[in-house]
């Protein structure tokens, strides 16, 4: 690793060197320029030179390394060029510039033959971008290839165990992304086990962040809070990751607050955390709607409206930088929370009707985008995707509150179930109530269709002549009752 040159202002010396074409710089000046660019890029508190951001500094470092390699033919410079590609892609990804990150990291695969030690790292970072833009099949192929290419005998910037941790962690994030939570948990456990073979601080940080995000996705806020406090005390995170953890911590604390005085303080703490300058936009947007939804359920419409106002503002900005899946998901979830708030405050029928039209449109768009994602061999779990049950459940409640029949509400669930693994493999269309009655039900039979949700679950009871909808307890209560019944049956 090259460090800043002692006794020198990196910015001013950098400005002198960067004004000259690389072809005019001698080898010592090129090494100095690389060191300065690296120092400026790596220092999160540094004032960057005019006309440069961190991705551009990494790109400059790559060009300098390529020039040094052409002059010296030393393999270290081509490996460092590949390393700069990795970091250029990572910076672009962190800024939400995913199409640029995809292009840069794809170019990075051209170093495969000359820098085999860096290739698995570039593949894994590229897989991360593919996951974020919805190219899930390509992401899985890249991760499998990165795992196969992770040869401990080949020189690489990090130790082999650290690379293995990174591949396992990204496989967990991909599984979580497609709603395969059991596989996500499996890969995160493997990532944690692999940490025993490395001293890499970066690997430990990534594993901690993966586990915390997974706990929050499952709404295990107590466990997430414990992990966050441990991570903040034991690991040295960069400012963006630390800001993210502090926002997660504030959300966890807000989730467990009951008293009004404590709630007001917790809301202020979260709003302050969300306003941190180092917090990345896509991290900032994540908790806003979750908190709004929770406060509506608690009867705190005043608090919920503050977060809904933030969400509306954030949505306008987010649509410009989101992937199709994220944009469709965020709009459907925003409509879900808006619907919940409208019903809670007793909105007039005409307002509910307008909301229902908009909500059905965003829900249909969400289904189309999700249905276009590749079906992986490990399966997909649409109703395990973050907040999908709430999106489906709130639409059911709004449809019923607007006077629609239970039969039409049932078809909302059927459309969601048609995106599951088996339905997609068999290319099964969503079933109507008439289809279910003619194909499955005799005169004395009843079909129960459940929609478990972290907050309030739904069930439809269908017979040849009747269809009834009812609310049930949240998923955790249903799962505990199911497990208790299973044990009783085994006795």
Image: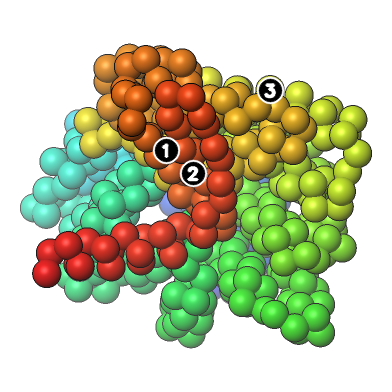
Q: CA distance from mark 2 to mark 1?
A: 6 Å
Quadrant where the C terminus sits is bottom left
At horizontal 18% and vertical 44% (from top left) the residue drawn is 147
Residue 485 screen position, x and y as percent: 26, 63
Residue that carries the numbered disc 3 in the rendered image:
361
Q: Nearer the viewer, residue 125 or 360?
A: 360
N-term mark: 2 or 1: 1
Q: Secondary structure at mark 3?
A: helix
Residue 379 screen position, x and y as percent: 28, 34
Residue that carries the numbered disc 2 in the rendered image:
459
- Label 2–label 1 contact, CB within 8 A: yes
Residue 128 screen position, x and y as percent: 40, 41
Q: Nearer the viewer, residue 397 or 220?
A: 397
Q: Is residue 312 left or right of residue 236?
A: right
Mark 3 or mark 2, whichever is nearer to me: 2
N-term mark: 3 or 2: 3
């Amino acid at each position: 690793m090259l460090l800043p040159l002692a006794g020198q202002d990196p910015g001013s010396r950098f400005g002198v060197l960067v004004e000259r074409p690389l072809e005019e710089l001698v080898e010592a000046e090129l090494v100095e320029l690389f060191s300065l660019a690296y120092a400026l890029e790596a220092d999160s508190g540094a004032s960057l030179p005019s006309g440069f951001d961190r991705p551009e500094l990494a790109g400059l470092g790559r060009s300098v390394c390529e020039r040094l390699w052409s002059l010296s033919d030393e393999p270290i410079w081509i490996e460092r060029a590949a390393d700069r590609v990795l970091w250029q892609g990572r910076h672009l990804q962190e800024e939400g510039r995913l199409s640029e990150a995809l292009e840069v990291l794809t170019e990075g695969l051209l170093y495969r033959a000359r820098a085999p030690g860096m290739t698995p790292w570039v593949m894994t970072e590229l897989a991360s971008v593919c996951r974020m833009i919805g190219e899930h099949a390509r992401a899985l192929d890249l991760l499998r290839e990165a795992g196969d290419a992770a040869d401990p005998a080949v020189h690489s910037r990090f130790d082999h165990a650290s690379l293995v941790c990174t591949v396992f962690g990204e496989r967990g994030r991909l599984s979580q992304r497609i709603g395969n939570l059991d596989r996500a948990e499996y890969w995160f456990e493997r990532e944690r086990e692999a940490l025993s073979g490395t001293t890499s601080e970066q690997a430990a940080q990534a594993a901690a962040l993966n586990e915390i995000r997974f706990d929050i996705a499952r709404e295990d806020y107590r466990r997430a809070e414990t992990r966050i406090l441990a991570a903040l005390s034991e690991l040295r995170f960069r400012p963006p990751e630390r800001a993210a953890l502090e926002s997660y911590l504030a959300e966890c604390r807000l989730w467990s607050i009951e008293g009004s005085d404590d709630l007001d303080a917790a809301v202020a703490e979260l709003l302050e955390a969300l306003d941190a300058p180092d917090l990345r936009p896509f991290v900032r947007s994540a908790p806003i709607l979750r908190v709004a939804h929770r406060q509506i359920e608690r009867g705190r419409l005043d608090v919920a409206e503050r977060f809904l106002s933030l969400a509306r503002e954030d949505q306008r900005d987010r649509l410009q930088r989101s992937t199709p899946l994220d944009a469709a998901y965020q709009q459907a979830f925003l409509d879900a929370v808006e619907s919940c708030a409208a019903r809670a405050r007793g909105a007039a029928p005409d307002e509910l009707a307008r909301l229902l039209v908009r909500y059905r449109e965003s829900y249909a768009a969400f289904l189309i985008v999700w249905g276009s994602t590749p079906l992986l061999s490990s399966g997909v779990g649409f109703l395990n995707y973050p907040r999908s049950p709430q999106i489906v459940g709130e639409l059911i409640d709004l449809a019923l509150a607007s006077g629609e029949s239970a039969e039409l509400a049932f078809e909302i669930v059927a459309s969601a179930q048609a995106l599951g693994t088996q339905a997609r493999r068999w290319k099964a269309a969503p079933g109507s109530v008439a289809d279910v009655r003619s194909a499955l039900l005799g005169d004395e039979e009843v079909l129960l269709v459940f929609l478990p949700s972290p907050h309030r679950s739904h069930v439809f009871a269908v017979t040849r002549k009747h269809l009834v909808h009812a609310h049930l307890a949240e998923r955790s209560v249903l799962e505990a009752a199911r497990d208790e019944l299973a044990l009783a049956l085994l006795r």
